[in-house]
Image: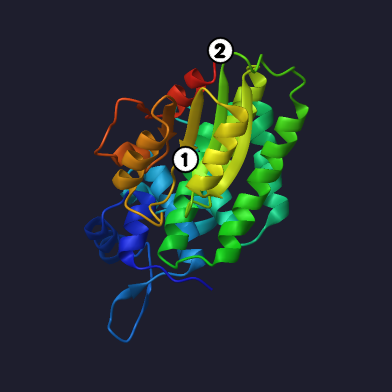
Amino acid sequence: MNFFSISDIENLTGIRAHTLRIWEQRYKLLNPKRKESKHRQYDNEDLKYILRIAFLYHSGYKISKIAGFSEEEIKKMALDTTSGKENYQVFVNQLTEASIDFDQSRYEKILHNLILHLGFEKTVTQILFPLLNKIGLLWMTDKVSPAQEHFASALVIKKILVAIDGVDKPPGNEGQRKVLLFAPEGEHHEIPLLFMQYLLKRNGVYFVYVGKNAHLDAIKDFCVQHNPTQLYCHLVTNLLSTDLNEYLKKISSVFPDKEIVFSGPQARKLDVMPSNIRVLKDAEAMLSFCNK
């Protein structure tokens, strides 16, 4: 059983802690447990319930109306609600619930239907990336176990590997553009790299896949053998063995003749920007980067 503070709930739902407290007092919507310190404590079932309420609230329902529904009615409405636009957040919430419950059958069914209706790329960029960011936040704050985080990641990796294998397109001319894919030492998230591999393969761009947690010496060896024109790295966490901006300066100086491309949540926070460094700030920029 996982337990969450009111600050965790605020971060995961986008509902301010002060507002959550008012909802508890005025509408009796929530009934959190209390620690000995009297601080609120929410369990897995509380989180799933609040995620559904938050989705309806963000979709335009007044909280006074939501408070009049039973828990089952709220669950059904969260599944049925549309507001004239694509409500990706409801699917992120559903997959989060399935991950917390280790419900593989439900997780795979949701994922299969999403890919069927939205397509693979949109499912990854609009739903799976936000999902993994949310699960990663829970993991880093010890609110879900490593097993739950690995459960969610493993099922996504499985889908991406199948998609990569299904691309029947010859690689581009390695004498032209060649991209080396890696994540630096300390970065263990591989899914964005695998997705980039899929995009490059689909677009016929030649690439070399180094993988996650790659030491700078290993990247040097690959560059000597394969002479890529670009290096691509996706940064999810800030758990590198050195300061991120220092790493940026170092890799820029080691490969002065290469364009080094970064993407991911941590890349958007970079302060230092050497001339041969480029940052892709969103999924659209990632998709554009993959075009020949």
Q: Which quadrant, please, contains the N terminus?
A: bottom right
Residue 234 to residue 99: above or below: above
Q: Identity of the amino acid at label 2?
A: Lys
> Label 1 to label 2, Cα distance in Å?
32 Å
**Disc 1 to disc 2: CB gap under 8 Å:** no
Q: Quadrant of residue 41?
A: bottom left
Q: Quadrant of residue 173?
A: top right
Residue 72 to residue 37: above or below: above
Q: Secondary structure at mark 2?
A: loop
Q: Residue at x 36, y 59 (%)?
A: 9
The image shows residue 233 at horizontal and vertical percentages of: 48, 37
Q: Quadrant of residue 260?
A: top left
Residue nearer the viewer, 228 or 170? 228
Residue 89: image tag: 1
**Residue to which mark 2 is pinned:** 292
Residue nearer the viewer, 213 or 229? 229
Q: Nearer the viewer, mark 1 or mark 2?
A: 2
Q: Residue at x 42, y 24 (%)?
A: 257
Q: Identity of the amino acid at label 1?
A: Gln
Looking at the image, is mark 1 or mark 2 earlier in the sequence?
1
The image shows residue 23 at horizontal and vertical percentages of: 29, 59
Q: Secondary structure at mark 1?
A: helix
The residue at the far front in this view is: 224
Q: Which quadrant, please, contains the C terminus?
A: top right
- Note whether residue 157 is visible: yes
